[in-house]
Image: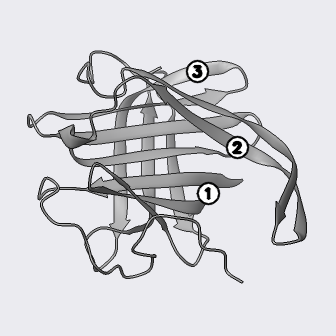
Amino acid sequence: CYPKSSLRDEFANVHTDIPGAITGELHINGKQYRINGLSFRDRGWGVRDWDYLLAHRWVAGSLGENFNFLALSYYGSDENLASFGWIVKDDTVFYASKLDIVTYTEIDGVLNRGGHVRFELANGEVYDIECSRVADKSFVSYHHDICCVDTLCETRCGDRVGFCDFESTSNIQAGKRKPGRFFNAHVNNGYLPRY
């Protein structure tokens, strides 16, 4: 689903981002949770050249069953700047003719606390989506020593309310230094329950 004209062939060349619903049960440490909500599936195959990224923003979410969105921008090591995105309303995909992603970056220069996404669609419609962190900490993972931050957010656009994953990397040093401390996240990979 990613436009080939905007991406290097080696980065996310076979990739899908699909909104949907999730239902079921989750069992953790003897506790059971019922799940019934909206979801977003990020699935890639093949090679993902993370070393290529100097910075990126990936925002995927939903503002209800009939309104889903994806926005991506990146800065590549070959000095390429690209951005693209789309909104799915009902069963129709509307591509952005112009996209702006603003990231609210923490004092550590790595973590994000959400941000703002503005879609200008080819049909003239404009959507401003505010993304505000809901969890007390972000999730951090490392891909080839590149620190990738995922922050779960509540989204608001007019009277619509939903969720998104606001993902970002800031790898301007090209992976030469691994952060040792974050403002509001755990330093190491992995799942850390609150209890």
Residue 16 placement, left or right of 47: right
Residue with the mark numbered 2: 39
**What amino acid does circle 2 point to?**
Ser
Residue with the mark numbered 3: 93
Residue drawn at (37%, 27%) of the image? 12
Q: Quadrant of residue 192?
A: bottom right
Q: In which quarter of the image is residue 92?
A: top right
Secondary-structure class at tag 1: strand
Secondary-structure class at tag 3: strand
List x then y, in percent, for residue 133: 55, 69
Label 1 crowd bin: few (<14), some (14–19), many (20+), radius 10 Å: some
Q: Which residue is at the front of the view, 63 or 122?
A: 63
Residue 177 seen in the current view: yes
Camera-side mark, 2 or 3: 2
Residue drawn at (80%, 42%) of the image? 22
Secondary-structure class at tag 2: strand
- Mark earlier in primary sequence (2, 1): 2
Residue 45 placement, left or right of 142: right
CA distance for labels 2 and 1? 16 Å
**What amino acid does circle 1 point to?**
Arg
Q: Spot the residue most to the front.
A: 29
Residue drawn at (27%, 34%) of the image? 49
Query: Quarter holding the C terminus?
Result: bottom right
Q: Which residue is at the front of the view, 138 or 49?
A: 49
Residue with the mark numbered 1: 156
List x then y, in percent, for residue 160: 70, 51
Residue 180 placement, left or right of 28: left
